[in-house]
Amino acid sequence: MSYQPPGGYPPPEPYPGQGPGPGPGPGGQPQYWQESPKRKGMAIAALVLGILAVLTFWTIVGGILFGLIAVILGVIAMVKSSRGTGGGGVMAVIGLILGILGIIGVIVVAVVGWGIWQDSGGQDFVDCVSKAGGDQSAISQCEDEFNQRFEDQYGVTIAPPQPTN
């Protein structure tokens, strides 16, 4: 007597050269083939790097580095997930979005920082120091002028660090 599953269909025959199909398991119950879980490594990596990109965007290098890698891995993981060869599609999308947000954050910080640098006379300071050559008194004069301009413009006093005893 052979096993007939509910519905009256016979169990599938194995492919040629594959050997017998699943045999009876413990207690005489039939064993069924189970698909192995799909790999989610790239999706997890994209998610982790996307989180790091959002957390470190203000460092510019961290935001760009983590953001770009998160975007690349997120796209690859999404393609694999859509083809059915990989898992973690949702994690891949979230990692991709966080990577993009990290890159956008870097762009905003860079634009704002560049604007502050230009408004505070940063380029004038660099030009002054380059004209001074190695003359310490001229460099000191450039620093004093930059500090005074910064203080007048933003109301913030730039003071050298005080030694602690």
Image (spheres, helix red, strand yellow):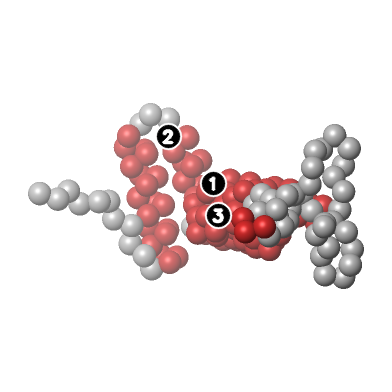
Task: Identify the residue under disc 3.
Answer: 48
Residue 130 image position (x, y, % from top left): 47, 35
Between 103 and 137, the residue placed more toward the observer is 103
From the viewer's side, name the closer residue of 144 and 78. Answer: 78
* Label disc, if present, on residue 61 of the rendered structure: 1
Which amino acid type is marked by label 2? Ala
In 3D space, how far apart are the residues under numbered discs 1 and 3 (Cα atoms)?
17 Å
Viewer-nearest residue: 151 or 61:
61
Check the image and report above or below for 134 versus 79.
above
Which quadrant, please, contains the N terminus?
bottom right
Mark 1 or mark 2: name the one nearer the start of the chain: 1
Identify residue for label 2. Answer: 132
Q: How many marks?
A: 3
- Asked which quadrant contains residue 27, the reply is bottom right
- Confirm or deny contact between disc 1 and disc 2 (CB under 8 A): no
Q: Position of residue 109 (x, y in %)?
A: 56, 59
Q: Is residue 37 left or right of residue 133?
A: right
Q: Is residue 8 above or below residue 32?
A: below
Does label 1 or label 3 sit earlier along the sequence?
Answer: 3
Contact check, label 1 and label 3, Cβ < 8 Å: no
- Classify mark 1: helix, strand or loop: helix
Occupied quadrant, residue 102: bottom right
